[in-house]
Amino acid sequence: MKIGFIGTGWFTNKHANILGAMDGVDVTAFCGTSLEKAETEARKWSNAKGYSNIEEMLDKQSLDAVYICVPPMAHGAIEKALLERKIPFFVEKPLGINDEPFEIARKIEEQNLVTSVGYHWRYMDISKKAQGMLKERQVGMALGYWMGGMPMVPWWRDVKSSGGQFIEQTTHIVDLLRFLCGEVKEVYAAYSSRMMSEKVEGTTVSDVGTVILKLNNGIVANISNTCILPESNKAGLEVYTNQGVIEISSNQLRDIRGQEISEYRNQLDPYKVENELFLNAVKTGDSSPILSTYSDAVKTHRITIAAAQSAMTGAPVILER
């Protein structure tokens, strides 16, 4: 299989290195914002070439799949170019910062194109274990968090480029809530800028925020985030049930039943799992093992942009069924 990458940052390196260790997979193309960046990545691979234009890359190479690892504001034209050529793609979250992903999702469904989105929390061992536990418990509510510092890249702190922390970062917790607890029907958010706009030049994103979510099944959830801390504090989801609390972080599950606490850790690399399932789906045409297709991920996107709308207007947003 010949694989191309659009983007030259951390996620490109992460996925490319995983693919490089797989049999029958050949990383052959990199497209960057400059030819220099793309060629720098390409030199790491014996058969790869660098490009600064996606159309040129697609014209000169016959690719079986493409990975899209770009900042939030760069989505849209890339996905449409791949759709025109019916090339399966893996895209890192978030899907964008506006309504464009809904149009892309419709075209994907029309073509029945194989896609996957990088919501890797779904692929953790502990997420699967939590799913099994919750089948035998009644959930009342959930609390989610993404509490940390501000990533020091210019686009992240610009709300017009990143969409803000809830869209760019906390989307993982929103998606995990959907995965474990069900679909959301109503969103109400309150955001504020407390200090980062004064500390870091060019900051227009809110630095604190909390979002109340009502689910179709009656569960109530709250997901909060901040980027004011000097270092990462915690990110995860707590699910409150009739048998106790299930706490999920990026590498651990805690099942708390009064004084009895059981702990579990991931045994497999979720990034590796999501890559293997995606490439196997490309080979077979069967997307059913993929836990986060584009068509599913757009539901998480709808929630995060609804939160931004609610924070702006001060009113709750009812989501379309």
Image: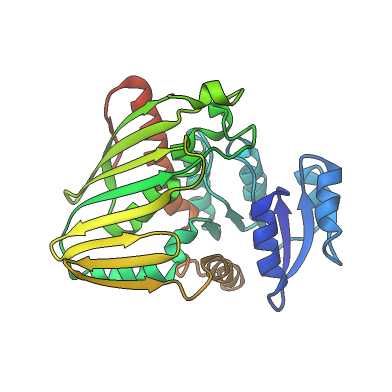
Residue in view at x 84 percent, y 52 percent: 40
Residue in view at x 66 percent, y 49 percent: 82
**Image location (x, y in percent) of residue 270:** 51, 67
**Image location (x, y in percent) of residue 247:** 31, 60
Residue 319 in view here? no
Quadrant into which the C terminus falls: top left
Residue 104 in view here? yes
Is 93 above or below relative to 180? above
**Does 130 sit left or right of 7 as displayed?**
left
Is 300 above or below relative to 27? above
Quadrant into which the N terminus falls: bottom right
Q: Nearer the viewer, residue 111 or 104?
A: 104
**Does 134 sit left or right of 84 as displayed?**
left
Residue in view at x 45 percent, y 28 percent: 206
Q: Nearer the viewer, residue 24 or 242?
A: 242
Residue 278 position by quadrant: bottom right
- In this figure, what is the number of numbered marks? 0
Q: Nearer the viewer, residue 292 or 38?
A: 38
**Image location (x, y in percent) of residue 90:** 59, 56
**Does 253 sit left or right of 38 as displayed?**
left
Residue in view at x 40 percent, y 32 percent: 208
Q: Nearer the viewer, residue 236 or 131?
A: 236
**Image location (x, y in percent) of residue 91:** 58, 52
Q: Residue furthest left?
A: 242
